[in-house]
Image: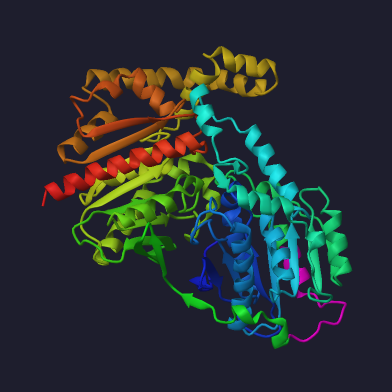
């Protein structure tokens, strides 16, 4: 869905943390329309459900409700890190301040807050600390933090890291008492604070919350303790189905907005309460949070060095691309500019929030770094549903958009040399951006699935992995892989494999295929390529089988590093650490080359 109403980025600061939010202006701002705050879940659930929450906010704003989406401190584009201590307190302050800002900024007399997972727990704690919240919608929210932490631990145990024994030891060396799941870590102190959090023990003043809507989770009933405590606090509690929770939490390119729930919640928000609601008074507001500082930029101190982050949009025929630019306060006009591209359908924060960490670290090194959303991803306009088909990630117009981003940054005076970095399809965009645009001096590519899209590619890879490996047949016998999938592959392979074999034979006879020619062109144009591959990556296997990884004499401009584990999105600690180190080395080499050319 394209945004029809203004969406304004805002930083809300209370002197300790800065909360990044996107404010959806309502079609008509009036006291009768409830203002709404949307609080996210944590970790992988936050990544998967992001686009759905954007759709939700757009629908609410279109119905006349000013709506604010936030990233909790240490997550998304807000300040801090989830690995720091004291995050539960920081999250609670963020909700209090965001609700306060909504009340003070809009004409609405009432503020409702929507919380999913961890976001709902934090909402309850914020209410007990005086947040100006009149109504709550809680979806998949446990009454106790212990339940949430236990779910994270279960998720962590089920993850297949693909690490060897030595790397598994490193993975297990997270600080004692901390929680690691889905590529995200919570400190031991925050984990302990969550373990102790019990909503039924929070002091919620009578009539503070007039209404509460508790949504089940695809048939799993809301927590009875949560229901009981809100009822005892004087809230009018409604239970409703939350069908579509699982679809919203699917992998980012497959996640779908639960529109029936959105409609249901909107109807509930617009229903008058059956109970009398006390008029809002200044005494109900939290006076210590009245002096909030609001800004359209964020200033951070990273290791004692100040940097600035600024939201940025790029106009396109279909709407806008959206990004966050991290840059040094005192920029070197000769430094190259880095552009961090989406990792598939993951928004601009990157896998496991790595792009945020990298952008801020490289800004300290004097390199302006933009993390950006291309069409249909994150906060860029366009349809997310087009990415149901893998081919859509390799559409040429996405590379056009990369070049448009470069145009915008150059117009802002951010230099004439650019480095592109991406994972998966983002790596492909980086490769083709380097091919197409003379201003791109280097491309850093993590786990590219392919660099030249071929509709037969998946069939060939499935054949190699599905029919030629004994482990695949064992998976069929155990019922882990449907036999129908193998039979379908057997039917497709005879049609595709001969044609592909002929194409490869012809390429060898004529001196190389389009990939060889592209590498030759990039070499001749003096462009540096950095590949990073995890274990078990299909493109890595193909390059090894074809002998391309051993041709440093032909392509001295190409560097290749290998990452531990076989998780495509680098969830394991060793994978992330090695990727950070390899990218830092690649950047250092490119900086040395840039300044040597001056």
Viewer-proximal residue among 328 and 374: 328
Numbered label tally: 0
Residue at horizontal 40 percent and vertical 22 percent from the top:
541
Instruction: Inspect this view and state whether residue 45 appears.
Output: no
Q: Residue 471 occupies which quadrant of the picture?
A: top right
Residue drawn 39% across and 58% down? Answer: 302
Q: Position of residue 434 (x, y in %)?
A: 26, 45
Near-viewer residue (526 or 227): 227
In the rendered image of this protein, does residue 218 appear above or below residue 103?
above
What colouring style does the render use?
rainbow
Q: Quadrant of the N terminus?
A: bottom right
Left or right side of 100 for 304: left
Up the image or down, 143 lies above or below 25; here it is above
**Residue range corresponding to the magenta coloring:** 263-280
Depth order, front residue of 473/334: 334
Residue 565 visible to an observer of this rendering = yes
Q: Position of residue 452 (x, y in %)?
A: 36, 35
Compared with 278, 199 (above or below) is above
Closer to us: 170 or 458: 170
Residue 227 location in percent, x, y? Answer: 85, 60
Q: Is residue 462 above or below residue 228?
A: above
Residue 177: image quadrant is top right
Residue depicted at 30% across the width and 47% down the height:
433
Residue 296 in picture, x, y percent from top left? 44, 73
Residue 14: say if magenta: no
Q: Residue at position x 68%, y 61% from top?
A: 122
Q: Is residue 575 left or right of residue 330?
A: right
Q: Is residue 275 magenta?
A: yes
**In-image side of 324 versus 419 (left or right):** right
């Amino acid at each position: 869905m394209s945004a029809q109403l203004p969406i304004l980025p805002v930083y809300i600061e209370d002197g300790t943390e800065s909360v990044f939010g996107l404010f959806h202006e309502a079609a008509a701002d009036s006291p009768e329309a409830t203002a709404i705050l949307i609080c996210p879940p944590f970790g992988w659930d936050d990544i998967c459900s992001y686009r759905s929450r954007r759709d939700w906010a757009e629908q609410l704003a279109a119905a006349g409700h000013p709506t604010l989406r936030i990233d909790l401190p240490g997550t998304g584009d807000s300040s801090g890190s989830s690995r720091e201590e004291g995050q539960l307190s920081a999250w609670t302050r963020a909700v209090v301040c965001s609700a306060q800002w909504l009340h003070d900024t809009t004409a609405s007399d009432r503020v409702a807050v929507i919380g999913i997972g961890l976001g709902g727990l934090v909402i309850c704690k914020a209410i007990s600390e005086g947040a100006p919240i009149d109504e709550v919608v809680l979806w998949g929210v446990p009454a106790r933090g212990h339940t949430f932490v236990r779910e994270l631990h279960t998720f962590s145990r089920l993850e297949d890291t693909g690490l060897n024994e030595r790397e598994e030891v490193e993975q297990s060396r997270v600080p004692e008492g901390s929680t690691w799941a889905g590529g995200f870590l919570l400190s031991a102190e925050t984990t302990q604070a969550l373990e102790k959090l019990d909503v039924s023990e929070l002091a919620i003043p009578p009539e503070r919350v007039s209404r509460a809507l508790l949504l089940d989770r695809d048939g799993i009933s809301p927590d009875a303790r949560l229901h009981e405590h809100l009822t005892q606090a004087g809230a009018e509690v409604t239970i409703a189905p939350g069908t579509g929770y699982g679809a919203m939490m699917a992998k980012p390119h497959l996640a779908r907005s639960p529109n029936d729930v959105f409609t249901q919640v909107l109807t509930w928000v617009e229903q008058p309460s059956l109970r009398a609601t006390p008029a809002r008074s200044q005494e109900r507001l939290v006076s210590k949070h009245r002096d909030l500082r609001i800004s359209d930029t964020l200033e951070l101190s990273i290791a004692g060095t100040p940097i600035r982050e600024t939201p940025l949009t790029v106009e396109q025929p279909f709407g806008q691309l959206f990004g966050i630019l991290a840059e040094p306060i005192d920029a070197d006009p000769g430094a190259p500019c880095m552009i961090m591209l989406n990792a598939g359908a993951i928004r601009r924060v990157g896998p496991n929030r790595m792009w945020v960490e990298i952008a801020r670290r490289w800004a300290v090194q004097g390199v302006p770094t933009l993390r950006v959303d291309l069409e249909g991803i994150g906060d860029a306009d366009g349809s997310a549903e087009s990415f149901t088909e893998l081919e859509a990630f390799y559409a040429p117009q996405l590379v056009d958009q990369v070049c448009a981003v470069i145009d915008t940054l150059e117009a802002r005076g951010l230099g004439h040399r650019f480095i592109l970095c991406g994972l998966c399809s983002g790596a492909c965009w980086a490769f083709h951006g380097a091919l197409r645009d003379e201003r791109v001096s280097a491309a850093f590519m993590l786990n590219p699935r392919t660099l030249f899209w071929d509709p037969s590619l998946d069939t060939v890879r499935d054949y190699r992995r599905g029919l030629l490996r004994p482990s695949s047949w064992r998976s069929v016998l155990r019922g882990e892989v449907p036999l129908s999938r193998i039979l379908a592959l057997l039917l497709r392979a005879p049609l595709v494999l001969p044609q592909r074999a002929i194409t490869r034979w012809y390429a060898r006879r004529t001196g190389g295929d389009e990939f060889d020619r592209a590498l030759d062109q990039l070499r001749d144009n003096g462009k540096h390529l950095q590949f990073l591959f995890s274990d078990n990556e299909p493109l890595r296997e193909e390059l090894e089988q074809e002998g391309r990884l051993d041709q440093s004499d032909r392509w001295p401009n190409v560097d290749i590093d290998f990452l531990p584990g076989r998780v495509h999105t680098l969830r394991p600690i060793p994978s992330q650490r090695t990727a950070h180190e390899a990218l830092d080395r690649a950047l250092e080499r490119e900086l040395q080359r840039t300044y040597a050319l001056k």
